[in-house]
Amino acid sequence: MKIEELRETLTGLIAPVVKAVGVELDDIEVAKMKGKILLRVYIDREGGVTIDDCEAASREIEAVLDVEDPIPYSYVLEVSSPGLDRPLKKPKDFKRFSGKKVRLVTREPVEKQNFFVGEIELATDDNVVLLLPKDRKITIQYDNISRARLEVEV
């Protein structure tokens, strides 16, 4: 089974399990590591997650993986939150963090630039509007975003 197929299978198994614990599946990373599979599961919810949430989700995920046995190798399971500087991947992420500062890299230049740091002013289903320094605004299509992360403000 290819890694991407395994990731899709795991997403289907894990999403309802973590939902039952009261959190949302944010992302899954699957990687090969020294003859084992490293399975990183990122969970989240409004207001953030606690260590207890991660422990509860981990127990439930292990239980379903033991029964379903979708991973043909031994594996290491890590469950955590996406972190303060979490990646923004979906329109709902940008909408959720409207008003927050973001660091964003585009695939193709927008106004002769590929790197932006600004506040999310508006997020639609198709694009995000960033408020940049000097009250400049820029609209970026999601399919042109290579990477985006929340900017940790200290």
Image: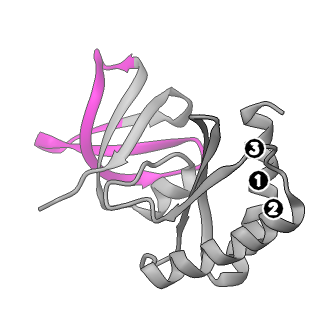
Residues at discs 1 and 2 in contact (Cβ within 8 Å): yes
Magenta-colored stretch includes residue 136? yes
Residue 107 colored in magenta in the image: no
Q: Classify residue 111 by image quadrant.
A: top left
In the picture, measured across the screen, residue 119 lies left or right of residue 105, that is left
- Can you tell which quarter of the image residue 115 is in? top left
Whether residue 50 appears in this view of the structure is no
The numbered disc on residue 73 is 3
The residue indicated by pointer 2 is 13
Q: Residue at x 64, y 43 (%)?
A: 37
Type of amino acid at the residue the image marks with label 1: Leu
Q: Secondary structure at mark 2?
A: helix
**Percent coordinates x, y for residue 151 in the rendering:** 25, 51
Alpha carbon of mark 1 to alpha carbon of mark 2: how far? 5 Å
Percent position of residue 57, x then y: 62, 75
Q: Position of residue 87 (x, y in %)?
A: 43, 48
- Total marks in image: 3
Identify residue type, mark 2: Leu
First in sequence: mark 3 vs mark 2: 2
How far apart in space, not on screen, are marks 3 and 2 (Cα)? 17 Å
Neighbour class for label 2 at 10 Å: few (<14), some, many (≥20)?
some
Residue sitting at 78 percent across and 63 percent down?
65
* In the image: residue 118, left or right of residue 13: left
**Front residue of this view, candidates 37 and 80:** 37
Position in image of residue 11 (x %, y %):
74, 54
Dot 3 or dot 1: first in sequence order is 1
For residue 10, the mark is: 1
Q: CA distance from mark 3 to mark 1?
A: 14 Å
